[in-house]
Amino acid sequence: MAEPEAKRVKTEYELIYWPGIPGRGEVVRLLFEDAGVAYIDTAKGDNAVPTTLSYMDASNLGDEKNPPVFAPPVLKHGELVINQLSNILLYLAPKLGLGPASGDGVYHLNSIALTILDGLCVEVHDTHHPIATHKYYEDQKEEAKLRAEAFREERLPKYLTYVQRLLDAKTSGEGGWLYGGELTYVDLVLFQCLDGTKFAFPKTVEKLKKSGKYDDVFKLYDAVKERPNIKAYLESDKRIDYSDGIWRHYPELEEDE
Amino acid sequence: MAEPEAKRVKTEYELIYWPGIPGRGEVVRLLFEDAGVAYIDTAKGDNAVPTTLSYMDASNLGDEKNPPVFAPPVLKHGELVINQLSNILLYLAPKLGLGPASGDGVYHLNSIALTILDGLCVEVHDTHHPIATHKYYEDQKEEAKLRAEAFREERLPKYLTYVQRLLDAKTSGEGGWLYGGELTYVDLVLFQCLDGTKFAFPKTVEKLKKSGKYDDVFKLYDAVKERPNIKAYLESDKRIDYSDGIWRHYPELEEDE
């Protein structure tokens, strides 16, 4: 792949996201961290909540060049403002040297990213909020138990099976990465989403790991964790602890032993 | 926009999707229909189910050039095979003259498509399957009532408000379309998803329409419906009736009068 464009371009990247949770913003951070590219992270500033809310406000109609956004994460780069996580990744990948700028690989990687996000981000969120995003977990706890059971028993194995298929496929090439024989942004997507899912469902993920059916998936997870820039980031204060975001741990949503 | 590339290229497009429901495949169909570009639709052939299943089979590892796919819709174009609806739309739009091939508009349109699909496709599906996709509606009917209430009261108005914001924004330009002053694929996405949501929740959508808060959204819906190619398609035998797919009508999931 070409030299990361971001190292040549001076315009700074700005990530707008909620403070206090890794959340969807964390996937964006991992791309910058792995690429070693500086970025402004509003979640770490003093005005994180009002800044984020201002983008979502009904009175915010974007500007001359950008339509309004629906929800964070939001990426600002020069005059461009975009939202939707997979869309931000699609935009950043070639600029950070983490994916091709054109050709079939763009669409293959985008579909892999979308699928992993569906399974290990959106569906994990839905385990603790199966009825209403705007209501408390405690008000949908019984439904959450049912939804979590379906996630543990059906959905999570189904998605992990798919990721293992990607690694078994010829298109993964050599080296243990998901596509094209070298690390791309979808490997970082998988790492973050599996890490979050492990936090939410530690027993379930450990059991699936021990099944031996997804060995290459977990090997990839470990390999991302050991990449120098990622390792340094994970050990730093910059990495935000999991709490009550997308990836939450409620012991009652795991299988009884 | 440039002349649709598909009119110059001879390779045929093939849509692989479930038979008997409009579903996610219908959004892809509307792009071809509006553009007047021929396509093979496996859903209309004799082997629709086995063909679709063969792509999802755990033993299917794709080929030399394409990773395996997770779920339909799948698009084949020459040697390329891709899945994930928004990804298929991203690929097709510039080829069918329904979106730019490069530049900021690519990312703005992709984020709009993703948001409309989240709200009026994925979340509508979840109203009748809030607990487990692989189980019957009848086994999650009580939870479905709660989820549908949250959809009707909170989520649907929230998404329609966002679409109205897009239309109020300067970036929509003149003409009543969502982006850039001319029809793009996201207008077709909105049409199909709103049409499906109307089928599923007719009373709710009618009530929201009458509120007068989303007039431009419903005007856009009507304008798509009157486009000659779309109108001819909707009146033809090719248009599949709604049944038990994503957009289903269960009277008990609507508000009592």
Image (cartoon, coloured by chain):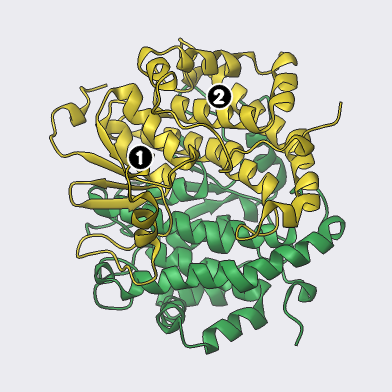
Chain colours: A yellow, B green
User: Counting other residues with Cα less than 10 Å from the Cα at mark 2, is it few (<14), some (14-19), or many (20 or more)?
Assistant: many
Tell me if mark 1 has few (under 14), some (14-19) or many (20+) residues whose alpha carbon lies within 10 angstroms of its own.
some
Q: Nearer the viewer, residue A203 or B230?
A: A203
In this rendering, the answer to whether A89 lies above or below B90 is: above
> What residue is shown with label 1?
A44
Dot 2 falls on which chain?
A
Residue drawn at x 12%, y 35% as measured from the top left: A10
- Left/right placement of residue B241 relative to residue A18 reads right
Which residue: 76% across, 83% down? B256
Q: Is residue A159 above or below residue B97?
A: above
The quarter of the displayed image where residue B176 is located:
bottom left
What chain does mark 1 sit on? Answer: A
Q: Secondary structure at mark 2?
A: helix
Question: Which x, y percent locates residue A141?
Answer: 76, 50
Q: Residue B36: x percent and y percent?
A: 40, 64
Q: Tell me the quadrant of the picture where the C terminus of chain B can be found.
A: bottom right
- Between residues B48 and B193, which one lies in front from this camera angle? B193
| Left or right of A70, for residue A65 | left
Q: Amino acid at mark 1?
A: Lys
Q: Secondary structure beneath disc 1?
A: helix
Residue nearer the viewer, A179 or B144: B144
Query: Are the two marked residues, 2 and 1, in contact with CB atoms closer than 8 angstroms?
Result: no
Task: Find the residue positioned furthest to the front.
Answer: A46
Residue lying at 39% horizontally and 36% vertically, measured from the top left: A28
In front of the other: B99 or B7: B99
Q: Which mark lies nearer to you, 2 or 1?
A: 1
Q: Position of residue A99 (x, y in %)?
A: 34, 28
Checking the image for residue B136, the label placed there is none
Q: Which residue is mark 2?
A: A166
The answer to which image quadrant residue A54 occupies is: bottom left
